[in-house]
Amino acid sequence: MMQHDPTVEAMNATFRAEVGLICGSLVRITGDFDLAEDLVQDAVVVALQRWPVDGVPERPAAWLLQTARRRAIDRLRRDSTYRAKLQQLTDGWAPDVRTEPDDRLRLIFTCCHPALARDAQVALTLRAVMGMTTSQIAHAFLVSEATMAQRIVRAKRKIVAARIPYRMPDADELPERLAEVLASLYIVFNEGYLGSGPDLSTSRDLCADALWLCGLLARMLPDESEVLSLLALMRLHESRRATRFDSSGALVLLRDQDRSRWDHAAIAEAGGLLEHARRLGRPGAYWLQAAIAACHAEAPTFAETDWAQILALYGALVRINPGPVVRLNRAIALEHVAGPAPAMEEIDALRSELDGYHLYWATRAELLRRFGRHDEAADADRRAMELTDNPSERALLEARLDPTVIRAIGANNH
Amino acid sequence: MKYVLLFIRNEETDIDEASRSAHYAAIDEWFGELARDGKLRGGEELQPSNTATTIRPQEGRPLVTDGPFMESKENVAGFVTIDVADLDEAIAIAKSWPPDDQIVEIRPVVNHEDMSNHPVS
């Protein structure tokens, strides 16, 4: 499971709470995103070396600022280009630079600017707002540190060269710009949720980071329905995260999970968030996904799942987002409501679009078994296995190919 | 900060005569507003790409050929240089470009007075 070293957790909590504020303030003071972000990142790297030895300082924000300030002075000596900008930092910079929550919000919108590629948005947000190091981000997203470093450098160069501003979007741009931020946040959460395995220890829990940042956004933008909805969606996933693996580390499907171990307080809270979000505006894509997750989470048993409601919600979601994966999930709900034949029709129609998606083949295999087409089902399972590297999913598919084990897997089953 | 907006259009579709005057009236108004706001630094509408001549180095010598530098249905149909605060302002202006069947590419202009603004990859 996750590491529970108190020092690591204390450090991560400190970075989460402080780095975005400090970085945002430095961007405001220097007017230079690239420079400010580098200074804070340097301070984080030093902290990661010092704090495990010396302990987390009593005033960690002041410590980080002081370290960033020393870095600024070093640079000032080496590099005259930045002289004017750095002079402001080193002259007028009292140990407690005035940090403002709005600075952090502006920083988030800069990192998630639509002129930056999604993977760069995600990496920049984790670095500048959450204080993750390039090495940690590379590790979390399974790319080399050199690749990740290059991605970040390119994105920061573009911010400078194209002059991507450090400011809040205007009211008329806000929905579009917020959608970028939420999409990046959900990628972070999913990477943590789907990437985590029973025995994978990481130094940063991406789910906790994503939840924290989404919670912050919800406090700062309390009238934005989709922010509250994404927060509810993450909490609903999180509420049953502990039951996704059994004691031997094997993946447990939704229908087999021990529902008494789900976090029912979190589920109720998410329900409240969704009700509130519904009153704020027309249901968006996150609201619908969260409502579907709530249907699953609130069902006392798998058999009592309200599939008719889920099918209706998927219908609404398909109208907003007619992508093939949403249609695949809708087909699974359709099977529970109308039986395997109409579901199979939908699944057949999606074949060319989802040929490379392992859960398409796993879902198809399960449906083929309903019709007793066992050879075809086994072929589909093998195809699914070729397409996934996730060890837990592979183990489950292998078990299903073993004729002595009868289990099932589906796209919205885990 | 200067940006060039490149207007890209599918040359296989043509504007019908009936809507042509409305099309140019909307564009005139767009230019007029940019000029009044002091943000316009010039721009041109281009003849179609079948009028283009391309010169490319071939074995160290300039070779003159017929046609645009890249064969494509979509071609640059015009450009404008604007001087605005930042990319968000450039995006807002690009979004307001009247023809709804054209792509707009925004390219920041290199400022040779500012050494930190050298071309980047």
Image (cartoon, rainbow, N blue to C red):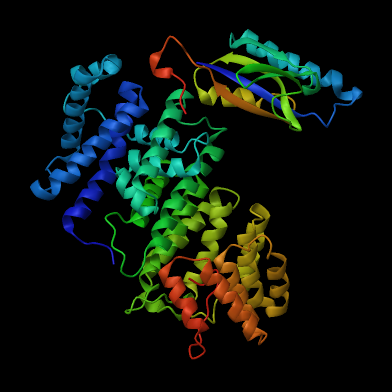
Image position of B85 with respect to B71: above or below: above
- Residue B101 in sight: no
Could you tell me which residue is drawn at 35 percent across and 28 percent down? A34
Can you name the residue that lies furthest to the bottom here?
Answer: A404
Q: In the image, is residue B45 above or below residue A123?
A: above
Of residues A22 and B17, the one drawn nearer to the viewer in this rendering? B17
Q: Is residue A170 visible?
A: yes
Name the residue rendered at 53%, 66% in the picture.
A387
Q: Is residue A308 left or right of residue A208?
A: right
* Apparent side of residue A52 relative to residue A33 in the rendered image (left or right): left
Residue at left 55%, top 51%?
A279
Please tell me which residue lies in front, A15 or A349. Answer: A349
View extreme (front): residue: B59
Q: Position of residue A195 (x, y in %)?
A: 40, 61
Q: Position of residue B54 (x, y in %)?
A: 71, 19
For the N terminus of chain A, the image quarter is bottom left
Q: In the picture provided, is A353 more to the left or to the right than A197?
A: right
Q: In the rendered view, does A65 fall on the left or right side of A238? A: left
| Residue A343 drawn at (x, y percent) | 69, 74
Report how many numbered discs are placed on residues in the image.
0
The location of residue B104, given as percent across then percent down, is 65, 27
Location of residue A81 with respect to B70 vertically, above or below: above
Q: Nearer the viewer, residue A186 or A83?
A: A83
